Image (spheres, rainbow, N blue to C red):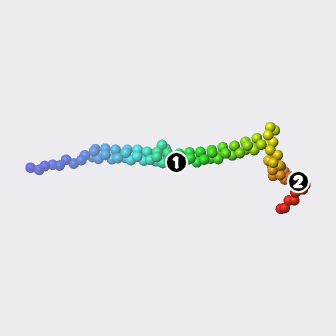
Amino acid sequence: MKIKRAQPSVGAAVFLLAVGCIGFYFTFAAIQGDFGVFRRVEASAERASLEAERDRLQAEVARLENLTTRLSDDYLDLDLLDERARDVLGLIRSDEIVVR
């Protein structure tokens, strides 16, 4: 009497292949998809860069507000006015010598 071994069916092999493909797809999407790990790291780096840019621009705005206040009608800084007139208009006093 011969004992016959059971061979895996083709259906089981197709099922395992389908499950493996679906698992690979979800793993790939979790790592590199639109909402994956790599995109999250990219977004974090972009956020840090944009926050640094924002801080730089806020400092620039504060500097310009300070200069604007110093040249306003309520508070006039004569040294700043003299500096700006020399720089923008190219003015000099009569007792100064300009070396170019």
* Mark 2 or 1, closer to the camera: 2
Outermost left residue? 1
Q: Is residue 15 left or right of residue 7?
A: right
Q: What crowding class fits label 2: few (fewer than 14 Cα within 10 Å), some (14-19), or many (20 or more)?
A: few
Image point (62%, 47%), residue name: 53
Label 1: which secondary element: helix
Which SS class for mark 2? Answer: loop
Pointer 1: what residue? Answer: 42
Three-letter amino acid code at the position of disc 1: Glu
For this rendering, which residue is in front, 29 or 80? 80
In the image, 20 versus 58, the foreground residue is 58
Q: Quadrant of the C terminus?
A: bottom right
Q: Looking at the image, tell me whether mark 2 or mark 1 is earlier in sequence order.
A: 1
Give x and y (percent) for residue 99: 84, 61
Q: Nearer the viewer, residue 73 or 37?
A: 73
Instruction: In the rendered structure, find residue 93 and report the number of the disc placed on it.
Output: 2
Separation of marks 2 and 1 at Cα, in angstroms? 56 Å
Residue positioned 31% across, 44% down in the render: 15
Q: Residue 93: x and y, percent?
A: 88, 53
Residue 88 visible from this viewpoint: no
The label number, if any, that marks residue 68 in the structure image: none
Name the quadrant containing residue 22. Answer: top left
Relative side of 4 to 15, left or right? left
Residue 56 is left or right of residue 44, and the answer is right
64 displayed left or right of 92: left
Residue type beneath disc 2: Arg
Q: Residues within 10 Å of mark 1 (few under 14, many from 20)?
A: few
Q: Position of residue 77 (x, y in %)?
A: 80, 44
Mark 2 in CB contact with mark 1 (< 8 angstroms): no
Which residue is the extreme one toward the right? 94
Residue that sits furthest to the top in the current view: 74
The residue that appears at 31% across and 46% down in the rendered structure is 16
